[in-house]
Image (tube, rainbow, N blue to C red):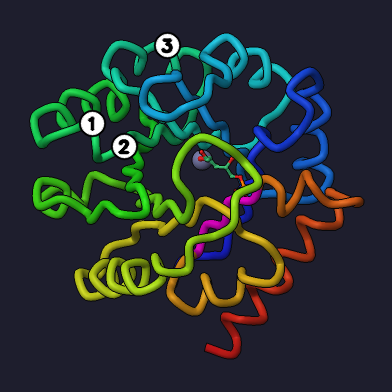
Amino acid sequence: MNDIRIAPSILAWDLGDLERAVEISVEGGADQIHLDVIDGHFAPNITFGPGTVKALRRRCDLKFDTHLMIDAPLQYVDKFLEAGSDLLTFHAEVLDGPKFDELYRPVKARGKEVGLAIKPRTDVPPWALERLDKISTIVVMTVNPGFSGQTMDMTVMPKLQKICGLVKEKGLPTDIEVDGGVEPENVGEVVKRGGNVLVAGAGVYGKKDPVRAISELRGRAEKARVKA
Ligand code: DX5
Ligand code: ZN
């Protein structure tokens, strides 16, 4: 069983002070930083690009989990690799098998990891099932891409459980990341369904004490796992 990992999403912090956002994650003992890149086409918001990732890289050694919610990932994959991303997550909705292979090659060549994200109403496509061994992380979104602070869509839970079961059955080491509306109140349910990487924007940065919120989420997640 893969370890529980907490991945604060800096999109929920003051975008004028992202240096503090990464500091909070380090102080709170987060495992990785979730960086939401949105291009205004794939989803209705525009966030930040490789320049920001690069600037933060100079300030922080944690694993950078870059979630690319963009229509043309192939155009930017090298830029995000150069910027210092460790895990590059692409959306299934804009890919097919050959496109995935084209993205996989440069990431693999740099020794970095590829993730595959799916929106709440998307299933893992057949071409991705054939390539599961190349995907280090499946990102199951529990909100529609675009904004931090939305409520988790609990109707995604059966799909999450199904994906976790499939990975287990195949004996793969794939991480299952859950992204959208993760809070102390629902993190237990997510873990019981098999999620192990927990993204939290508002669930960390929206709290009075964000540093403590990281350990609180971890505590609740570990507890749910013991019970399961
Ligand atoms: C949504 C992003 C999420 C989001 C998470 O487009 O992919 O990562 O920022 O924030 P919360 O945890 O507040 O839903
Ligand atoms: Zn995200």
Q: Quadrant of the image for the N terminus?
A: bottom left
**Of the image marks 3 and 2, the number of the one nearer the N terminus:** 3
Q: From mark 3 to mark 1, how far is it between C-alphas?
A: 19 Å
Front tag of 3 and 1: 1
Say what secondary structure mark 1 lies in. helix
Relative side of 161 to 153, left or right: left
Tell me where residue 79 appears, x and y as whole percent: 42, 11
Residue corresponding to mark 1: 94
151 and 85: which is toward the camera: 151
Three-letter amino acid code at the position of disc 1? Val
Looking at the image, residue 49 lies above or below residue 3 = above
Residue corresponding to mark 2: 91
79 and 154: which is toward the camera: 154
Looking at the image, residue 223 lies above or below residue 159 = below
Residue corresponding to mark 3: 79
Q: Are marks 3 and 1 in contact (CB under 8 Å)?
A: no
Three-letter amino acid code at the position of disc 3? Lys
Say what secondary structure mark 3 lies in. helix
State which quadrant residue 183 falls in.
bottom right
Is disc 1 surrounded by few (<14), some (14 to 19) or many (20+) residues within 10 Å?
A: some
State which quadrant residue 165 falls in.
bottom left
Say what secondary structure mark 2 lies in. strand
Instruction: For ligand 1, tell me if the residue under mark 2 lies within 8 Å.
Output: no
Q: From mark 2 to mark 1, how far is it between C-alphas?
A: 6 Å
Question: Which residue is depicted at the point 10% across and 36% down?
Answer: 97
Q: Which residues are magenta?
A: 196-200
Tell me where residue 57 appears, x and y as whole percent: 64, 21
Is disc 2 surrounded by few (<14), some (14 to 19) or many (20+) residues within 10 Å?
A: many
Is disc 3 surrounded by few (<14), some (14 to 19) or many (20+) residues within 10 Å?
A: some
Tell me where residue 150 appears, x and y as whole percent: 60, 50
